[in-house]
Image (tube, rainbow, N blue to C red):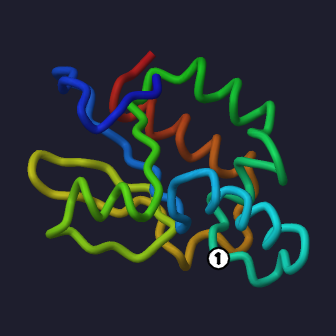
Amino acid sequence: MVGKVTDPRIPGRPRIYFIYNANSGKLYAYLDMLHKVLSPKTYPCQLCDITYGVTKIRPEWKDFREKSKLNMIFLHKDEWEMAFPQTPIALPAVVLEKGNEFETLLGPEDWENLTLGDLIFKLECLEQRLIGS
């Protein structure tokens, strides 16, 4: 389940935030695409890299997002900073909201050897722990 920051809270379903190390907007999307092609080793958003190809979402990721019961919110760096100005975070990150606090599940140091399959497996385990079957 994919939602927005402004969506009402779902009782019993904590929010999982996916925060890209990239800014929102078409111009930034084009610049990111260019960066991925010209200098993939220096591209600063591994979350973007494993979940999206150069131009579109990876089919396995799209399928997982559509089937998952996790309350997932996807934000770019600037959107996170606007929604949570008092909560700086190292990016890219996957963060679990726990009441008024946040627990980093995956931070910048966790992405180096992570594959899309690894990410999906971790999230499936989290879903099992938080929601059950």
Q: In which quarter of the image is residue 84?
A: bottom left
Residue 23 sits above or below residue 4 on the image:
below
Question: What residue is drawn where x is 27% and y is 74%?
Answer: 88
Give, as a three-letter code, the residue at label 1. Answer: Pro
Q: Residue furthest bottom?
A: 42
Q: In this view, does 77 lie to the left or right of 39?
A: left
Q: Where is residue 96 in the image (x, y as percent from the top left)?
A: 32, 50
The residue nearer to you, when weighing 17 against 104, is 17
Residue 94 x/y as whole percent: 45, 56
Q: Is residue 79 left or right of residue 68?
A: left
Q: Mark 1 points at which residue?
A: 44
Residue drawn at x 86%, y 80% is: 39
Name the quadrant containing residue 132. Answer: top left
Q: What element carries label 1?
A: loop
Looking at the image, the residue that sits furthest to the front is: 27
Q: In this view, does 71 lie above or below 92?
A: above
At 53% from the left and 68% from the top, the residue drawn is 21
